[in-house]
Image (tube, rainbow, N blue to C red):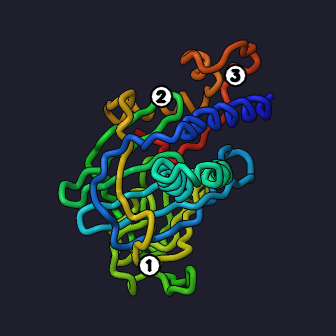
Amino acid sequence: MRQIIFVLFSCLVLVGFAQVEQRTLAPITVYDTAHTMAYYDLDYRKDSTKNIYRKGRTILQISENYLAFSDYYTLLIDSLNDYAVRHKELEQEISEQIGKAIKRIEYREPLLTNLLKGATTFQMGIWVKLEYTTPTPQIAWQLMSGDTLVNGVACKKAMGRYSGRTYVAWYAESIQLPYGPYIFGGLPGLIMCIYDTKRNWIFTNSGIGPATSLATMYLYADKDREKMDRKKALDSYRNERENPVRVATGRGLLFGATPEMMKSVPSNLLEQEW
């Protein structure tokens, strides 16, 4: 039955993204243009009780005043869609590329950090579009003994705790950027690999370089996006992830769901405590 629910949920996600096919410019608020990109492969478990990993690709955009973190394929889709709006003659070809990219999206919680104000805005949700802004988390890292190579770069070890998980981070002192994937930062060098000690979420650097494309740093500006505090937003988001069919039905996006389909499914959000 979980497979049925997953299939329905996946179909509804595709229906939601199919709105892109109308070829309208995505409603966004642009904040800056990145000068550097760091790419991270993502391995994560949707169900913490099963040793089954899903794989994705994420991207950290870096400018003097902002950091932005999101799914690489989401940025690619937005860029392709906007290109199609301006080049109608290529719409069919671009539609095919978008269709392929949609299937590869795994990370769905884009965020933007204002380095000057020390605040981070998070966005999330499929059926219920949510947003909250909070002081950028400061992790109390412990520098540990140990070293390794990540993507050919020498790294040192640190450990810290955030939102209910304990993390191991490998950072490169040779890359003087005190940042990393998601909100992980504050170490004397770029975080090249980070994972929680139970290995539910693993981010591994796969490249870094000048921003030559997909450099626009933005957040979505949907009219129906609900802004709220962190607790309310994460409570709502967890409910959506654990009860996708129930939430979709309540929103009028799915009809005829049986009581069996309404049962909760596991969630393994990156954030565990709030």
Image vertical order of residue 9 relative to residue 198, above or below: above
Q: Which mark is residue 22?
A: none
Q: Residue drawn 74% across and 53% down?
A: 51
Q: Cβ–Cβ below 8 Å for labels 2 and 1? A: no
Question: Of all residues shown, which one is farthest toward the front?
Answer: 89
Q: Amino acid at mark 1?
A: Gly
Q: Write down the residue under mark 2.
A: 128
Quarter occupied by the C terminus:
top left
Depth check: 150 or 100 in front?
100
Q: Which one is in front in this view, the residue at disc 2 or the one at disc 3?
A: 2
The answer to whether the residues at label 3 and label 1 have Cβ atoms under 8 Å apart is no
Q: Is residue 55 left or right of residue 73?
A: right
Residue at the (31%, 33%) spot, across then down: 229
Quadrant of the rendering where the N terminus is positioned: top right
Distance from Cα at disc 2 to Cα at disc 1: 35 Å
Mark 3 = which residue?
263
Distance in Å between CA atoms under marks 3 and 1: 45 Å
